[in-house]
Image: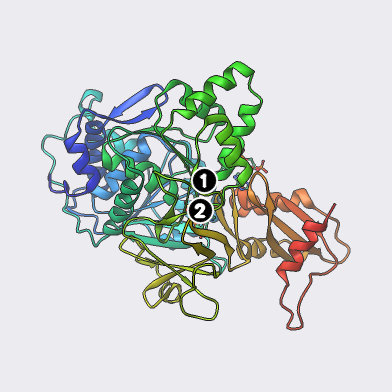
Amino acid sequence: MSDSHLPFVRTALANPYRVALVIQESQCRYRDLLSVSERVAHFLLRGRSDLQEARIVLLAPPGFAYVAAQWGIWRAGGVIVPLALAHPVPELTSLIADADPELVLVHPYTEKQGIPAAEACGVPWADVVDSLRGPPGTVLSDLFSPMPDAPPLPAIDESRDAHIIYTSGTTGKPKGVVTTHAATRHQVESVARAWEITRHDRILHALPLHHVHGIINALLCPLCQGASVELHNRFDPDAIWDSFARLRITVFMAVPTMYVRLLRVLERMPYQRREVVGWSAGDVRLTISGSAALPARVRQRWEQITEQVILERYGLTETGMVLTNPLHGPRAQGYVGEPFPSVQVRLRADGGGEAVPGEEGCIEVRGPGLFREYWRRPEETAAAFRDGWFDTGDRAVRDADNGYRILGRESVDIIKTGGEKVSALEIEEVLRRHPRIADCAVVGIPDDEWGEQVSAAVVLVRGAIFPAAELRAWVKLHLAGYKAPARIMLVDELPRNSMGKVLKTQVSDLFLQAP
Ligand code: MLC
Ligand code: AMP
């Protein structure tokens, strides 16, 4: 097989009978993933020898079909563009148009939004489940064996692109982050080394599969080591506790909002069940939080219940994982530790030059795991780097004992809610299109559950009545539900400086001072 240099294919060939995925009551072995992904690859190739980096959009819930399609796209020489299940048709349409794919793979669960979006872009679509079935006449028992007469799959040079992951930009438009196979391998190896992920691990996975957190850390990294991934198709706190209690989970990764929800559900359990599931979570060797700041009280409560100190780490779509607390050794509250293997980090002081210990600065990153470019945005790509260092836009301070402490972001227009990055400008653009809105400003307001809540100060056109629920519904028509403002405040005018620029800090104060 000529694609055996792909790390996950190599691992699968070496561990054919190990369990790769556990999905509800079913298990799938590495050799099953190999056979079915080969079928997906030939389905996509349609007789060609190589997809030559054609983009394939994947719009499928976490599950066997998703993983088989992911492997199949890569094995055929394609670039995978995983999109969020939460996008409504207009948002999906603009992302598909931007990615300019050869095909959109939908799933019975996503076809309601996926098919109209693909058709609006004039892009063909196919059902991912059909892609797994193989050529007509294939019987079920053949599915899980190698295809006898199939031509070899292409050899993929590591310098080729592997995936495009969309993330909100400060300009209001989501940008596609293009990462090569080589960079992906570095990200995977770096995570595996830092956290000692091995074939003996069993990872509990309940993250969405359109972000690096879910794709690289919790799925690809374990699968490249020969570990097992218990894949949940959505985040359900009861099901997570159940998995802790029933299965011998060794590693769990989540965003802070998920820990908040898990604790809330646990507090409501009858005493005995609470004790049992709490203990079983204590057997997990590594519990990780990332994508947003982990509140101290969440970490403390988790530790009281499970005797586990959550390991907090920091990363970005553009860079993969950057900073981590130690696997062995103390994990200081509020700190995200030191760089992952092969990642270089420096703090740029406000006056230029490198910050000295204890001085605040902006985090810059360099290393082999970085993205290649923002898809078809050369100016934005160039602007994101300074002398070869990627400018994260996050502020931090470092001390010799505990490493880095994240202080916040430079841009007030980026909001992190439930681990999802949201652009305030994108939401303002949609709100301004509403006929009753004269002006608006969107900010992120600190929140115990979500980290930040999307909050909009709105000036209505003269004489209009306040349509709060209608405004949320309006945003949801155009953008994912988590982008709809959770809080809407009616104001007569927005605070502005003498140049007419909206003063977002003062807008935030309006919410913080509201009863
Ligand atoms: C859902 N809602 C949100 C939300 N997700 N509101 C704010 N922020 C969010 N992220 C809204 C829904 O629209 C709904 O509103 C209401 O909350 C309840 O929805 P739900 O169905 O109960 O929420 P749920 O689906 O359970 O989602 C919550 C969540 C999800 C925490 C599971 O947000 C999630 O999976 N977050 C993880 C994101 C992630 O993986 N980020 C990694 C980025 S990579 P209504 O009005 O419809 O009722 C990265 C790099 C790195 O950051 O370092 O990892
Ligand atoms: P994304 O663009 O979705 O990849 O989000 C990356 C951003 O998430 C970073 O730039 C940070 O702002 C934020 N982030 C990730 N991990 C952490 C963390 N542990 N603490 C605080 N912020 C984090």
Front residue of this view, candidates 112 and 205: 205
Front residue of this view, candidates 173 and 514: 514
Which quadrant contains ligand 1?
Answer: top right
Image position of 169 (left or right of 29): right
Question: In the drawing, what numbered circle is on residue 29?
Answer: none
Q: Position of residue 82 (x, y in %)?
A: 41, 50
Secondary structure state at the residue bearing disc 1:
helix
Per the image, the residue denoted by label 1 is 113
Q: Position of residue 134 (x, y in %)?
A: 25, 35
Front residue of this view, candidates 147 and 201: 201
Q: Amino acid at mark 2?
A: Leu
- Tell me: residue 104, above or below residue 464: above
Q: Amino acid at mark 1?
A: Gln
Circle 2 crowding by C-alpha within 10 Å: few under 14, some 14–19, many from 20: many
Per the image, the residue denoted by label 2 is 92
Front residue of this view, candidates 242 and 473: 242
- Residue at the extreme right: 463
- Tell me: residue 170, above or below residue 218: below
